[in-house]
């Protein structure tokens, strides 16, 4: 039998290993890149990668993000897994089991969540995870552009990133049902990788990730210090008439009349030791790793 390969933990200050991690990611997730996010300094102590190395190359990985979840109005300390994988040449040798086990050990008894994909739905139950449904939310709402368009902010700018971090840490969680706070470094990953909708500034302390497609406003996330009248601000977020809004989170706080619009079949949420209620919810899309 081959010896059990050691697992190495990579943190924000391990520059050489961080580069090895960045080389690994697109070998497993073709369109995904961590380099710009690293260059922005967004890899903090909240993010750790558990890897198996071979000749200085990362061949398997399970990343762990420390999370401040909101669950039915309470804070729950938890972890979220991401970038779990093994390079194609090394699959079937137990290397992913090795990094998954090391990453889970590092989480102790804390709850863990992760967003998977259809190919690995049978993989995570082997590690004590269970699938949990996610719901889509939408509202019928007609509006036309009006008032000064909300300026677009660029997360390339370190000052903008710092302000988003403060809003996310100190502001209102976008949902109390099943969400999080203090996840600006996850949201910025989407921006760095080119996957985020534009970040729009409705006011000094009210920023939203939003965009129009067809006649629908997609409102992915809201970072705000205080509640505000979202309905009144919609005309500043659109450049053409809209007839509906879709939410990237459970909108119980921001649009109480929103309706369930079916199951989110692309989410593939898995949870472990996380006492979720059966009430419909959508974990914020910008807080997923
Ligand atoms: C899924 C993946 C991580 C498995 O990696 P691997 O190194 O081949 O897995 P291991 O050899 O450590 O296998 C561990 C266990 O999972 C099982 N397994 C492996 N791939 C599986 C899959 N796709 N579905 C279900 N079970 C799987 C193995 O049979 C093994 O079972 P056992 O330990 O009980 O005997 C790898 O195929 C991969 O990187 N896929 C692409 C990336 C991806 O989709 N990652 C998930 C992102 S959420």
Image (cartoon, rainbow, N blue to C red):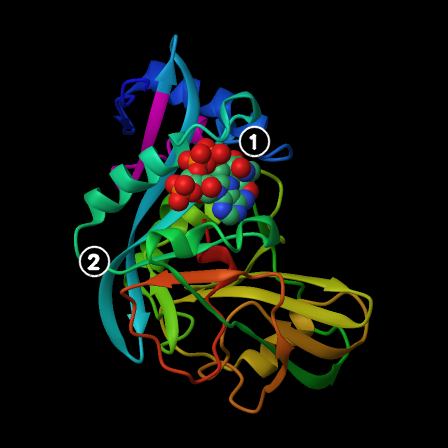
Viewer-proximal residue among 138 and 225: 138
Q: Position of residue 269 (x, y in %)?
A: 48, 62
Q: Residue furthest top?
A: 55
Which quadrant would the N terminus be assigned to in this image?
top left
Q: Secondary structure at mark 2?
A: loop
**Mark linked to residue 77:** none
Q: CA distance from mark 2 to mark 1?
A: 27 Å
Q: Quadrant of residue 260?
A: bottom right
- In this rendering, the count of numbered labels is 2
Residue 204 visible, this angle:
no
Q: Which residue is mark 2?
A: 110
Q: Secondary structure at mark 1?
A: helix
- Residue stretch in magenta: 38-52
Q: Which residue is mark 1?
A: 28
Q: Position of residue 8 (x, y in %)?
A: 27, 24
User: Measuring 35% from the left and 64% from the top, which residue is drawn there?
Assistant: 180
Asked if ligand 1 lies within 8 A of label 1, the reply is: yes
Vertical side of 279 occupied by 222: above or below: above
Q: Is residue 107 left or right of residue 135?
A: left
Residue 53 visible, this angle:
yes
Q: Residue furthest left?
A: 108
96 is within the stretch colored magenta = no
User: Measuring 49% from the left and 31% from the top, which residue is drawn there?
Assistant: 92
- How packed mark 1 is, by other alpha carbons closer than 10 Å (few <14, some 14-19, many 20 or more), is some
- How packed mark 2 is, by other alpha carbons closer than 10 Å (few <14, some 14-19, many 20 or more), is some
**Earlier residue among tags 2 and 1:** 1
């Amino acid at each position: 039998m081959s010896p059990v390969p050691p697992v190495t933990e990579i943190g924000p200050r391990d520059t050489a290993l961080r580069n090895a991690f960045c080389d690994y990611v697109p070998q497993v997730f073709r369109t995904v890149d961590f380099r710009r996010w690293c260059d922005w300094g967004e890899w903090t102590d909240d993010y750790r990668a558990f890897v198996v190395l071979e000749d200085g190359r990362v061949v398997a990985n399970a990343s762990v993000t420390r999370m401040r979840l909101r669950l039915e109005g309470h804070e729950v300390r938890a972890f979220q897994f991401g970038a779990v994988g093994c390079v194609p040449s090394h699959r079937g040798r137990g290397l992913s089991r090795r990094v998954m086990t090391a990453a889970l050990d590092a989480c102790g008894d804390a709850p863990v969540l992760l967003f998977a994909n259809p190919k690995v739905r049978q993989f995570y139950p082997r590690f004590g995870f269970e699938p949990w449904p996610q719901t889509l939310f939408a509202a019928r709402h007609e509006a036309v552009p009006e008032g000064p368009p909300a300026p677009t902010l660029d997360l390339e700018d370190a000052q903008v990133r710092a302000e988003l971090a403060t809003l996310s840490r100190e502001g209102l969680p976008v949902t109390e049902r099943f969400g999080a706070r203090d996840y600006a470094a996850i949201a910025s990953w989407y921006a760095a990788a080119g996957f985020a909708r534009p970040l729009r500034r409705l006011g000094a302390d009210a920023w939203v990730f939003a965009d129009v497609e067809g006649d629908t406003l997609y409102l992915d996330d809201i970072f705000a210090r205080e509640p505000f009248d979202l309905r009144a601000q919609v005309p500043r977020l659109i450049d053409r008439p809209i007839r509906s809004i879709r939410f990237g989170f459970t909108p119980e706080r921001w649009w109480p009349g929103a309706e369930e619009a079916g199951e989110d079949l692309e989410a593939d949420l898995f949870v472990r030791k996380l006492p979720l209620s059966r009430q419909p919810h959508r974990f914020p899309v910008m807080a997923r790793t």
